[in-house]
Amino acid sequence: MKNNRPIKLFVVSDSLGEMGKSIASALKAQFAGSFGAIKRFPFVMETTEIDDILAEAKAAPCMIIYTLVLAETRAYIASKGKEFGLPLVDILGDAMRVAEEITGKQPINEAGLNRRLDKEYFRKVAAVEFAVKYDDGTDPSCLKRADIVLVGISRTSKTPLSMYLAYRNYKVANVPLILGVEPPEELFNIDRRKIIGLTNDPDRLLSIRTERLKDLGIEKSENYANMEMIKMELDYANGIFEELGCPVINVVSRSVEETAVMIITMLNKLYGER
Protein backbone atom coordinates (compact mmCIF):
# COMPACT_ATOMS: atom_id res chain seq x y z
CA MET A 1 0.00 0.00 0.00
CA LYS A 2 1.46 3.37 -1.00
CA ASN A 3 0.33 6.67 0.45
CA ASN A 4 1.64 10.19 0.24
CA ARG A 5 0.12 10.97 3.60
CA PRO A 6 1.54 9.48 6.82
CA ILE A 7 -0.27 6.29 7.74
CA LYS A 8 -1.96 6.32 11.13
CA LEU A 9 -1.34 3.39 13.44
CA PHE A 10 -4.30 2.19 15.49
CA VAL A 11 -3.60 -0.19 18.38
CA VAL A 12 -6.65 -2.15 19.52
CA SER A 13 -6.51 -4.26 22.67
CA ASP A 14 -8.75 -5.85 25.30
CA SER A 15 -6.08 -4.93 27.83
CA LEU A 16 -3.77 -1.90 28.05
CA GLY A 17 -2.41 -2.31 24.53
CA GLU A 18 1.23 -1.91 25.52
CA MET A 19 2.43 -4.79 23.36
CA GLY A 20 0.76 -3.35 20.28
CA LYS A 21 2.02 0.14 21.13
CA SER A 22 5.60 -1.15 21.29
CA ILE A 23 5.25 -2.79 17.89
CA ALA A 24 3.69 0.34 16.41
CA SER A 25 6.57 2.43 17.75
CA ALA A 26 9.08 0.00 16.25
CA LEU A 27 7.35 0.29 12.86
CA LYS A 28 7.53 4.08 13.00
CA ALA A 29 11.25 3.87 13.69
CA GLN A 30 11.91 1.36 10.90
CA PHE A 31 9.82 3.19 8.27
CA ALA A 32 10.81 6.74 9.07
CA GLY A 33 8.37 9.28 7.69
CA SER A 34 5.84 6.69 6.52
CA PHE A 35 3.77 6.39 9.68
CA GLY A 36 2.08 9.16 11.61
CA ALA A 37 0.24 9.23 14.91
CA ILE A 38 -0.21 6.14 17.06
CA LYS A 39 -3.66 5.93 18.63
CA ARG A 40 -4.34 3.33 21.30
CA PHE A 41 -7.79 1.82 21.98
CA PRO A 42 -7.52 -0.12 25.26
CA PHE A 43 -10.07 -2.40 26.94
CA VAL A 44 -12.04 -3.10 23.76
CA MET A 45 -14.54 -5.84 24.58
CA GLU A 46 -17.62 -5.19 22.41
CA THR A 47 -18.12 -5.49 18.66
CA THR A 48 -19.82 -2.09 18.67
CA GLU A 49 -16.54 -0.58 19.87
CA ILE A 50 -14.72 -2.31 17.02
CA ASP A 51 -17.27 -0.90 14.56
CA ASP A 52 -16.57 2.63 15.79
CA ILE A 53 -12.80 2.12 15.55
CA LEU A 54 -13.00 0.75 12.00
CA ALA A 55 -15.28 3.59 10.94
CA GLU A 56 -12.67 6.05 12.13
CA ALA A 57 -9.90 4.06 10.44
CA LYS A 58 -11.65 4.26 7.07
CA ALA A 59 -11.45 8.04 7.10
CA ALA A 60 -7.67 8.15 6.61
CA PRO A 61 -4.76 5.93 5.61
CA CYS A 62 -4.53 3.62 8.57
CA MET A 63 -2.97 0.35 9.73
CA ILE A 64 -4.54 -1.53 12.62
CA ILE A 65 -2.52 -3.62 15.06
CA TYR A 66 -4.62 -5.66 17.47
CA THR A 67 -3.93 -7.79 20.51
CA LEU A 68 -7.25 -9.40 21.32
CA VAL A 69 -7.46 -12.54 23.46
CA LEU A 70 -11.07 -13.57 22.74
CA ALA A 71 -11.38 -15.61 19.55
CA GLU A 72 -14.76 -14.10 18.68
CA THR A 73 -13.52 -10.50 18.81
CA ARG A 74 -10.41 -11.43 16.80
CA ALA A 75 -12.61 -13.06 14.17
CA TYR A 76 -14.95 -10.07 14.11
CA ILE A 77 -12.27 -7.43 13.59
CA ALA A 78 -10.56 -9.62 10.96
CA SER A 79 -13.82 -10.06 9.04
CA LYS A 80 -14.87 -6.43 9.24
CA GLY A 81 -11.38 -5.17 8.45
CA LYS A 82 -11.26 -7.31 5.33
CA GLU A 83 -14.73 -6.10 4.35
CA PHE A 84 -13.57 -2.48 4.61
CA GLY A 85 -10.23 -3.16 2.90
CA LEU A 86 -8.22 -2.14 5.96
CA PRO A 87 -4.73 -3.55 6.65
CA LEU A 88 -4.72 -5.42 9.96
CA VAL A 89 -2.06 -7.24 11.97
CA ASP A 90 -3.14 -9.89 14.48
CA ILE A 91 -0.40 -10.06 17.11
CA LEU A 92 -1.81 -12.75 19.40
CA GLY A 93 -3.77 -14.91 16.96
CA ASP A 94 -0.93 -16.88 15.39
CA ALA A 95 0.88 -17.25 18.72
CA MET A 96 -2.23 -18.65 20.41
CA ARG A 97 -2.89 -21.07 17.55
CA VAL A 98 0.65 -22.45 17.78
CA ALA A 99 0.39 -22.64 21.57
CA GLU A 100 -2.82 -24.69 21.24
CA GLU A 101 -1.09 -27.07 18.84
CA ILE A 102 1.98 -27.72 20.96
CA THR A 103 0.19 -27.89 24.33
CA GLY A 104 -2.94 -29.68 23.19
CA LYS A 105 -4.92 -27.30 25.38
CA GLN A 106 -7.48 -24.57 24.79
CA PRO A 107 -6.72 -21.07 26.06
CA ILE A 108 -8.66 -19.78 29.05
CA ASN A 109 -10.07 -17.06 26.77
CA GLU A 110 -10.28 -14.43 29.45
CA ALA A 111 -9.09 -10.92 28.66
CA GLY A 112 -6.81 -9.12 31.08
CA LEU A 113 -5.40 -12.14 32.93
CA ASN A 114 -1.94 -10.58 32.90
CA ARG A 115 -3.12 -7.53 34.83
CA ARG A 116 -5.12 -9.10 37.64
CA LEU A 117 -5.08 -7.30 40.94
CA ASP A 118 -2.30 -9.30 42.54
CA LYS A 119 0.72 -8.35 44.62
CA GLU A 120 2.69 -7.56 41.48
CA TYR A 121 0.03 -5.11 40.35
CA PHE A 122 -0.09 -3.27 43.66
CA ARG A 123 3.70 -3.10 43.80
CA LYS A 124 3.68 -1.49 40.36
CA VAL A 125 1.04 1.05 41.43
CA ALA A 126 3.03 1.90 44.56
CA ALA A 127 6.19 2.39 42.48
CA VAL A 128 4.44 4.72 40.03
CA GLU A 129 2.92 6.74 42.86
CA PHE A 130 6.36 6.99 44.48
CA ALA A 131 7.97 8.24 41.25
CA VAL A 132 5.28 10.88 40.75
CA LYS A 133 5.37 12.07 44.36
CA TYR A 134 9.15 12.33 44.58
CA ASP A 135 9.92 13.64 41.10
CA ASP A 136 12.54 16.39 40.65
CA GLY A 137 13.89 16.38 44.19
CA THR A 138 10.55 17.19 45.79
CA ASP A 139 11.38 15.63 49.15
CA PRO A 140 14.98 14.49 49.84
CA SER A 141 13.84 12.47 52.87
CA CYS A 142 12.45 9.91 50.41
CA LEU A 143 15.89 8.98 49.06
CA LYS A 144 16.55 6.34 51.70
CA ARG A 145 13.30 4.58 50.70
CA ALA A 146 13.98 4.66 46.97
CA ASP A 147 15.27 1.62 45.08
CA ILE A 148 16.96 3.87 42.53
CA VAL A 149 18.09 7.48 42.76
CA LEU A 150 18.72 9.27 39.45
CA VAL A 151 20.93 12.35 39.55
CA GLY A 152 21.63 14.84 36.78
CA ILE A 153 21.21 18.33 35.40
CA SER A 154 18.12 19.47 33.51
CA ARG A 155 17.20 17.54 30.35
CA THR A 156 19.04 14.31 31.08
CA SER A 157 15.84 12.18 31.00
CA LYS A 158 15.44 11.88 34.78
CA THR A 159 11.63 12.05 34.83
CA PRO A 160 10.84 9.75 31.85
CA LEU A 161 13.36 7.23 33.19
CA SER A 162 11.78 7.41 36.64
CA MET A 163 8.36 6.59 35.21
CA TYR A 164 9.65 3.80 32.97
CA LEU A 165 11.54 2.17 35.84
CA ALA A 166 8.52 2.60 38.11
CA TYR A 167 6.52 0.53 35.67
CA ARG A 168 9.17 -2.15 36.16
CA ASN A 169 8.35 -2.04 39.90
CA TYR A 170 11.27 0.07 41.08
CA LYS A 171 10.65 2.98 43.44
CA VAL A 172 12.59 5.81 41.83
CA ALA A 173 13.46 9.28 43.08
CA ASN A 174 15.40 11.80 41.05
CA VAL A 175 17.55 14.69 42.18
CA PRO A 176 18.23 17.67 39.92
CA LEU A 177 21.74 19.12 40.00
CA ILE A 178 21.63 22.90 39.81
CA LEU A 179 24.78 24.95 39.39
CA GLY A 180 25.46 26.93 42.55
CA VAL A 181 23.02 24.88 44.65
CA GLU A 182 24.32 22.20 47.00
CA PRO A 183 22.66 18.78 46.52
CA PRO A 184 20.60 17.61 49.49
CA GLU A 185 22.62 16.15 52.33
CA GLU A 186 20.48 13.01 52.21
CA LEU A 187 22.01 12.14 48.83
CA PHE A 188 25.38 11.52 50.50
CA ASN A 189 23.92 9.43 53.33
CA ILE A 190 22.26 6.63 51.35
CA ASP A 191 23.54 3.41 49.79
CA ARG A 192 25.73 4.71 46.96
CA ARG A 193 25.10 1.56 44.93
CA LYS A 194 21.58 2.67 44.08
CA ILE A 195 22.63 6.09 42.74
CA ILE A 196 22.91 6.54 38.96
CA GLY A 197 24.35 9.69 37.40
CA LEU A 198 22.85 10.88 34.12
CA THR A 199 24.60 13.18 31.66
CA ASN A 200 24.25 14.38 28.07
CA ASP A 201 26.43 15.96 25.39
CA PRO A 202 26.56 19.77 25.47
CA ASP A 203 25.47 20.22 21.83
CA ARG A 204 22.48 17.97 22.35
CA LEU A 205 21.56 19.74 25.58
CA LEU A 206 21.72 23.11 23.85
CA SER A 207 19.40 21.86 21.11
CA ILE A 208 16.91 20.31 23.54
CA ARG A 209 16.83 23.34 25.80
CA THR A 210 16.44 25.75 22.88
CA GLU A 211 13.44 23.77 21.64
CA ARG A 212 12.04 23.69 25.15
CA LEU A 213 12.20 27.49 25.36
CA LYS A 214 10.42 27.76 22.00
CA ASP A 215 7.65 25.50 23.30
CA LEU A 216 7.29 27.85 26.26
CA GLY A 217 7.22 30.89 24.01
CA ILE A 218 10.59 32.18 25.26
CA GLU A 219 13.04 33.39 22.59
CA LYS A 220 16.26 32.95 24.53
CA SER A 221 17.76 32.54 27.98
CA GLU A 222 21.17 33.68 29.19
CA ASN A 223 21.46 30.68 31.51
CA TYR A 224 19.24 27.78 30.45
CA ALA A 225 20.13 27.53 26.74
CA ASN A 226 23.66 28.91 26.83
CA MET A 227 26.60 26.73 25.80
CA GLU A 228 29.05 28.10 28.35
CA MET A 229 26.55 27.64 31.18
CA ILE A 230 25.73 24.13 29.99
CA LYS A 231 29.42 23.19 30.05
CA MET A 232 29.72 24.63 33.55
CA GLU A 233 26.68 22.63 34.66
CA LEU A 234 28.14 19.43 33.21
CA ASP A 235 31.46 20.04 34.96
CA TYR A 236 29.62 20.67 38.21
CA ALA A 237 27.61 17.45 37.77
CA ASN A 238 30.77 15.45 37.01
CA GLY A 239 32.26 16.68 40.26
CA ILE A 240 29.20 15.50 42.19
CA PHE A 241 29.26 12.12 40.42
CA GLU A 242 32.91 11.70 41.35
CA GLU A 243 32.18 12.59 44.96
CA LEU A 244 29.33 10.07 45.05
CA GLY A 245 31.36 7.41 43.27
CA CYS A 246 28.31 6.48 41.19
CA PRO A 247 28.16 5.06 37.66
CA VAL A 248 27.37 7.65 34.98
CA ILE A 249 25.30 7.06 31.82
CA ASN A 250 25.36 9.43 28.86
CA VAL A 251 21.82 9.41 27.46
CA VAL A 252 22.66 11.26 24.23
CA SER A 253 22.35 8.32 21.85
CA ARG A 254 20.07 6.10 23.91
CA SER A 255 16.31 5.77 24.14
CA VAL A 256 14.66 5.75 27.55
CA GLU A 257 14.19 1.99 27.20
CA GLU A 258 17.87 1.38 26.42
CA THR A 259 19.04 3.49 29.35
CA ALA A 260 16.56 1.75 31.64
CA VAL A 261 17.91 -1.67 30.63
CA MET A 262 21.43 -0.52 31.53
CA ILE A 263 20.24 0.72 34.91
CA ILE A 264 18.26 -2.45 35.63
CA THR A 265 21.29 -4.57 34.74
CA MET A 266 23.37 -2.62 37.25
CA LEU A 267 20.68 -2.78 39.93
CA ASN A 268 20.02 -6.52 39.52
CA LYS A 269 23.29 -7.07 41.39
CA LEU A 270 21.80 -5.14 44.30
CA TYR A 271 18.17 -6.30 44.29
CA GLY A 272 18.12 -9.39 42.07
CA GLU A 273 15.79 -9.92 39.11
CA ARG A 274 12.31 -8.31 39.21
Image (tube, grey):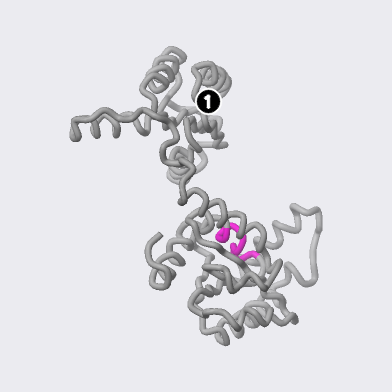
Q: Nearer the viewer, residue 173 or 254?
A: 173
Q: Is residue 235 left or right of residue 117?
A: right
Q: Is residue 23 left or right of residue 174?
A: left
Q: Position of residue 141 (x, y in %)?
A: 67, 73
- State the image quarter where residue 187 is shown: bottom right
Looking at the figure, which quarter contains the N terminus?
top left
Q: Position of residue 221 (x, y in %)?
A: 79, 66
Q: Is residue 229 above or below residue 89?
A: below
Q: Residues within 10 Å of mark 1 (few under 14, many from 20)?
A: some
x 69%, y 79%: residue: 184
Looking at the figure, which quarter contains the C terminus?
bottom left
Q: Nearer the viewer, residue 225 or 25?
A: 25
Start-end of magenta stretch: 155-162
x 61%, y 72%: residue: 143
Q: Is residue 45 above or below residue 215?
A: above
Question: Helix, strand, or loop for circle 1?
Answer: loop
- Work out which residue is located at the far top of the displayed protein and give it: 83
- State the image quarter where residue 229 is shown: bottom right
- Residue 160 on the magenta span: yes
Q: Is residue 259 left or right of residue 131?
A: left
Q: Is residue 46 above or below residue 247?
A: above
Instruction: Report which residue position mark 1 lands on.
Output: 61
- Residue 243 on the magenta span: no
Q: Identity of the amino acid at label 1? A: Pro
x 59%, y 74%: residue: 144
